[in-house]
Image (cartoon, rainbow, N blue to C red):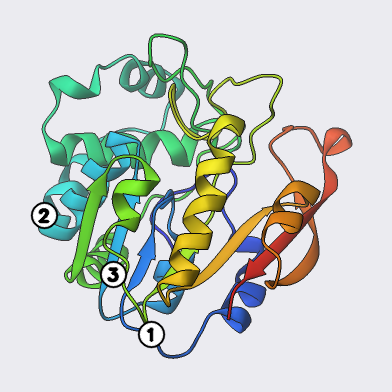
């Protein structure tokens, strides 16, 4: 099945490469930077832990898992108009129920500019309306997602809080945002999310997981610092079209890596 959320930085375009590298047998699947969780929905593991620092993602997957038809009820009640978009964008999600927050996030990400989740310094979502409204998930999509999430443990927190659940024989997929050391505007998440200063913690976690017999797959921008530290790992280099720029003339191919320890 496909992911419910539209998300900038999603690895939807390289799913065939991820699928070919992912191990066939493992204990439990863990994804600490879940986002749209495209690999999870592609593999559909029997047991999984999905984590994300963004509380709106946590609320959305929780609501879809437990109350998919209620999410559908609210989602189908929102007109796909500019006025509705900006009205909903201005709503404080903390004032909503979990089901309403799920409907709000799905709608906004299907409608906003390039599927970008960005907040201002106050943590308020501020992405403008995109050039088109994408199709919203229907009952079949939401019921399928709910079924996939039934045996999933959800974690709202830093990536290390998800990784504590990993044990020997498990499979961890790491897909952190490709941050820039010189600036942070929350392009892929919100204030306080993963950025360059956290890269050392991530690499150290990779080493610890390896020592503990956990299979790890990391997707990241081509980065000599990461490749030098993860000695003994295998690397696959990819040219991936990046579309966050928003205009065709500004989009370009970027070099990315898939690094894995098995």
Q: Residue at x 66, y 62 (%)?
A: 13
| Mark sitting earlier along the chain (3/2) | 3
Q: Position of residue 59 (x, y in %)?
A: 21, 42
Q: Quadrant of the C terminus?
A: bottom right
Q: Which mark, by number, is residue 67?
A: 2
Q: What's the CA distance linking mark 3 and mark 2?
A: 19 Å
Secondary structure under badge 1?
Answer: loop
- Write down the quadrant of residue 21 in the picture: bottom right
Pick the residue in front: 243 or 177. Answer: 177
Residue at the disc numbered 1? 26
Please tell me in which quadrant of the rendered image residue 92 appears: top left
Decide: marks 3, 1 in contact (CB < 8 A)?
no
- Which residue lies under the disc numbered 3? 48
Up-down relation of residue 117 to residue 209 (above or below): above
- Circle 3 — which element? strand
Q: Are the two marked residues, 1 and 2, in contact with CB atoms closer than 8 angstroms? A: no
Q: Viewer-nearest of labels 3 and 1?
A: 1
Note whether residue 161 is visible.
yes
> Is 67 or 21 nearer to us in this picture?
21
Regarding mark 2 in the picture, which secondary structure is present there?
loop
Image location (x, y in percent) of residue 14: 66, 66
Q: Give the residue at x 73% y 60%.
A: 257
Query: What residue sits 54% from the left and 79% below the top?
Result: 22
- Residue 102 sits above or below residue 30 on the image: above
> What mark, if any, has residue 223 been given in the picture?
none
Q: Residue furthest right?
A: 249
Per the model, the C-alpha gap separating discs 3 and 1 is: 11 Å
Q: Going by the picture, which residue comes out furthest to the top?
A: 122
Crowding at mark 3 (Cα within 10 Å: few <14, some 14-19, many 20+)? many
The picture quadrant where one finds residue 245 is top right
């Amino acid at each position: 099945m496909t992911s419910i959320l539209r998300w900038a930085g999603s690895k939807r375009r390289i799913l065939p490469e991820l699928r070919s590298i992912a191990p066939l047998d493992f204990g439990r699947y863990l994804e600490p930077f879940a986002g749209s969780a495209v690999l999870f929905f592609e593999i559909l593991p029997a047991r999984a832990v999905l984590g994300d620092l963004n509380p709106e993602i946590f609320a959305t997957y929780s609501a879809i898992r437990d109350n998919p038809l209620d999410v559908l009820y609210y989602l189908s009640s929102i007109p796909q108009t500019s006025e509705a978009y900006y009205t909903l964008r201005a709503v404080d999600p903390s004032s909503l129920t979990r089901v309403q927050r799920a409907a709000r996030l799905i709608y906004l990400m299907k409608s906003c500019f390039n599927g970008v989740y960005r907040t201002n310094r106050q943590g308020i979502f501020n992405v403008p309306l995109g050039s088109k409204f994408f199709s919203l998930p229907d009952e079949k999509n939401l019921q399928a997602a709910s079924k996939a999430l039934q045996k999933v443990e959800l974690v709202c927190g830093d990536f290390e809080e998800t990784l504590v659940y990993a044990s020997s024989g498990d499979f961890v997929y790491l897909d952190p945002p490709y941050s820039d050391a010189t600036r942070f505007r929350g392009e892929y998440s919100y204030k306080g999310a993963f950025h360059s200063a956290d890269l050392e913690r991530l690499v150290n976690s990779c080493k610890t997981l390896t020592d503990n017999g956990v299979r790890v797959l990391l997707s990241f921008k081509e980065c000599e610092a990461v490749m030098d530290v993860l000695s003994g790992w295998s690397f696959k280099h990819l040219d991936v079209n990046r579309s966050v720029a928003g205009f065709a003339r500004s989009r370009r191919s970027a070099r990315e890596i898939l690094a894995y320890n098995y």
